[in-house]
Image (spheres, rainbow, N blue to C red):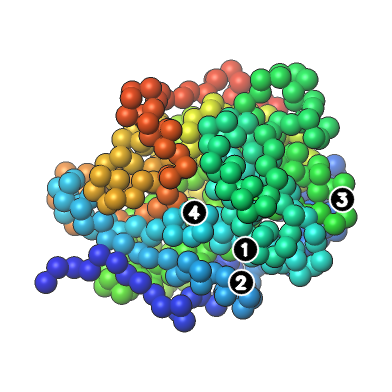
Amino acid sequence: MSAPTKYLLSEDRLPKAWYNLQADLPQALPPVLHPGTRQPVGPDDLAPLFPMSLIQQEVSTEREIEIPEPVRDVYKLWRPAPLIRAHNLEKALGTPARIFYKYEGVSPAGSHKPNTAVAQAFFNQQAGIKRLTTETGAGQWGTSLAFAGALYSLEVKVFQVRVSFDQKPYRRAVMETYGAQCVASPSNETVFGRSVLAERPDHPGSLGIAISEAVEIAAQNDDTKYALGSVLNHVLLHQSVIGLETIEQMHMADTWPDVVIGCAGGGSNFAGIAFPFIGQALRGEAPKPRIVAAEPAACPSLTRGRYAYDFGDTGHMTPLAKMHTLGSTFTPPGFHAGGLRYHGMAPLVSHVKELGLIDAVAFQQTECFAAGVLFAKTEGIVPAPEANHAVKAAIDEALRCKREGKAETILFLLSGHGHFDMQAYTDYAAGKLTDQHYDEQALAKALDGLPQVA
């Protein structure tokens, strides 16, 4: 009898609480610092940007935080998401490994991002907020917040990194269909955006610049708050529904992963799949898999960045967080995985890397697209360019198992589909897609300019 392909949970098994890894860590996360005083920030320091409910989640060390029933009701539009056995990919690789992937492309926005967008929109609406500002790279996050804003009658303004704004016009169209306003960043709508354009009118943009623009608008208006799609603790918390569901599904499959893989840019989808597995291991409830973060070689914060305090934005309007960073003034090259073009890694992901709980690998974009095309031909899903990094890492692990004759279980997160990224696939098929390399001198300058923190 053949093994099942899909492992599905019913809606009544949707998690009732998010999981907070901070409760189980052997060493506490370094504090976030005020950029002026260099002292730990308090709730009042964050209040101009976030509602108090999200600030409380940001600083909480409680293991479980209840998911409000209205949020769970929206989650049911696509959650629980499927766990799928990649039988055809296994056969194509000739590997004895068992490959599973958790698929988040079933959400309305086609990625994992609505898991936190819906939650953030809900808590902002409950606090009486009328407008949200945000940044987006490739557009998965902007699309998700636009969708969530429509559900909760919130105006949404999205500053999209210029290179992705130009590369991916249909993601912009989806945002506008949901009712959001999408602006190319750097823009003339903010003081910081105008300063960037004055220095370089053709600036390709970066997530750090787009964050500065969104923060500037939010900080100036009492009825407006800022929403971030990755990096922050409460964002990673909301994404834990991914791993919590997957743990149940792995039990259904009567196996346990030897390796867990996620792509990593800011850290939200990686944390979503990895943190619940790390937590179980830290509590002694299950064996710890090897956890692998797959990042772009053109923006390698985990593998080449420095672990230090840095700003989350280029305009230096945000607090200082200790993270793996390439420097807040660093502008990565314009590769197609725009969601991974961030100078820093989530403080919590950076912290567990420093504790030796995860590994990191970096790949060039052409080898990732080759992996994505093989996956599409065998499993039928065209992955987003960001998710291709996880696909590449999973294939490498499966081929290692083939060489070593090991029948390991490999689990990776397919964080979204690439239906709006087909120009990149067209360029790859035509041999026009090239690897992108960052400027070593620019990186060195950005790292030399990191804030001095005792």
Q: Which residue matches tag 3?
A: 221
Tell me the residue at 54%/26% (across/down): 333
Is 235 rendered above or below residue 283?
above
Residue 218 percent coordinates (x, y): 81, 48
Q: Which residue matches tag 2?
A: 71
| Residue type at the position of mark 4 | Ser
Q: What is the C-alpha distance between the residues marked 4 and 1? A: 13 Å
Tell me the SS state at disc 2: helix
The mark that comes first in sequence, 3 or 2, is 2
| Residue type at the position of mark 3 | Asn
Q: What is the C-alpha distance between the residues marked 1 and 2? A: 7 Å
The mark that comes first in sequence, 3 or 4, is 4
The mark that comes first in sequence, 4 or 1, is 4
| Residue type at the position of mark 1 | Val
Is 170 rendered above or below residue 246?
above
Tell me the residue at 58%/18% (across/down): 441
Q: Which residue matches tag 4?
A: 111
| Residue type at the position of mark 2 | Val
